[in-house]
Image: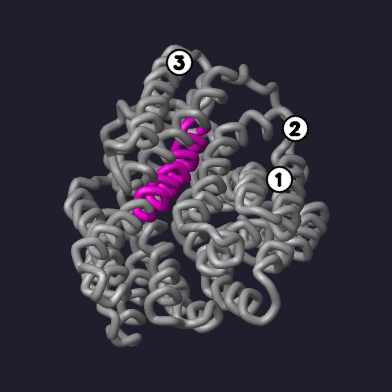
Amino acid sequence: MSARPQKLSPTNGGDDFSLKAILPPLLAIIVGMIMVILDSTVVNNAIPKLVEYFDTDLKTIQWTVTGYTLALSAVIPLAGWLTDKFGSKQIFLITITLFTIGSVLCGIAQTPEQLIIYRVIQGLGGGMVSPIGMAMVFKLAPPERRGSIMGVLGIPMLMAPAFGPVLSGWLVDSVSWHWIFIINLPIGIIAFILGTKYLPKSERHAAPHLDIIGMCLAPIAFAMLAYGVSEGGTSWSSTSAITGLTVGGIALILFIFVELNQKQPLLELKVFKSSDFTRSIILTWIVQLALFGAMLLVPLYLQGVKGYTALETGWILMPQALCAGIGMPISGKLFDKIGARPLAFAGLAVVAVALFILSGVKVDTSLWVIIVAICMMGIGMGFSMMPLNTHVLNSAPRRLVSRVTPLTTAAQQVVVSFAVAGLTGYLTSQITSHAASAGKDANPLTAVVAGYGDTFFLSACIATVGVALSLLLRKPRLKEEDQASDGNAPDPAMMMGH
């Protein structure tokens, strides 16, 4: 049989597959996803400037990150329903448009409250870009090549994390922080044009029942829990922390009860009956907790303690993304051969060591020590995240995959919001505690650095737990009844978060 790469389908064999044949639609998807990823990286580096500009505190401004990730998690479960009803191409273009509008609004925000609200609008638009984009990519890639394609796809996607902080730093230092959001306008227009031209037309299907109760309970539960965790970082006995955790906990219990009794739930919680899935998704959450909270702290430390400008911070952070870019395609190829467990173990071990190094930071810590640590974080992230995400995807029962993928992607965003809110609150409380114990005559920077050291140490301990749990991973054992009855397994790609 002669190879005809222009006629691609997910079921083609490896001999018929050609990456070149899927580059045009892949490019359209990548540009849209880069815009969303770019936004996350530029905001992290600009947070110190936002605190100064709005004359507020870190706990307030961190909600520009937490609110954004919670908004992502709120709309991700709707991706499947919307694509069934309106088609994946149409929804992809609509979400790109909403994200771009939200970006422009952020660029003209006058108060921190406005910025937080506009960031939520951004999240509502950006939440479905990655899952829908990845779903379309997986339709073009044969199952046996998905690990490799995920690795190749990761290289251009890492352009945003690599150059985002540098671009952010230059805009913040030389132009204005407003432009870190307005820059999304031309990128969004390009993504829309490419998507309109190159994305294949998608079929519409009969949309399933929409779980309205679950859709209302989930944002309440996760937003209040994130608020409780944020306030708890300062004082777990405070009224605000207790209120947030109580309201969020009750809403979460009600949400779980509703979902388990729905025929077509918003999030398919029954999948946790699979031990392989449960192990891999919990490990993924631990990686998210350890990595993404720490990645927010590093630029804060570099600017607040070491005194670097936003642009200098961007250049210092670039090696982390470049190292992740080196590790990601290698791990993609190795995953196809050796599976997730050795890669997750090695990657998480490197991340844990890097965080322990950062936990020892002082006022006069050498810049090269910090660069080595963040390079190690990048390598560890590149070797662990993609194999773990793909392993989660493979361990989900095939008959439930189309319902499970929104669960995994949304849950990851919720975990990131918890990491940012929790570690920011913990950092603030530790700095306050060290300052109080040091006395008035002590160098204030000493208390600040001690607070950062404590917070990095907490992240390192979380990563160490992940190293131990990675040994429990095993090759998924799919039962016969887990296979799709019609021979066409549901598309498993929508779990891939950004």
> Residue 418 lies in magenta, yes or no?
yes
| Badge 1: residue crowd in 10 Å (few <14, some 14–19, many ≥20) | many
Q: Nearer the viewer, residue 353 or 29?
A: 353
Which residue lies under the disc numbered 2? 86
Main secondary structure type of the part rendered in magenta = helix
Magenta segment range? Answer: 402-424
Work out how far the residue at label 2 is from the one at label 1, CA to CA, in angstroms: 12 Å
Disc number lying in front (2 or 1): 1
Q: Amino acid at mark 2?
A: Phe
**Where is residue 462, by image quadrant?**
bottom left
Q: Mark 2 touching mark 1, by CB under 8 A?
A: no
**Where is residue 32, by image quadrant?**
bottom right
Instruction: Name the element at disc 2.
Output: helix
For residue 99, above or below residue 444: above
Instruction: Name the element at disc 1.
Output: helix
Q: Amino acid at mark 1?
A: Thr
Work out how far the residue at label 2 is from the one at label 3, CA to CA, in angstroms: 26 Å
Which residue lies under the disc numbered 1? 95
- Tell me the tag on residue 258: 3
**Where is residue 80, by image quadrant?**
top right
Residue 468 appears at what percent x and percent y?
17, 52
Q: Amino acid at mark 3?
A: Val
| Badge 3: residue crowd in 10 Å (few <14, some 14–19, many ≥20) | some
Q: Nearer the viewer, residue 180 or 91?
A: 180
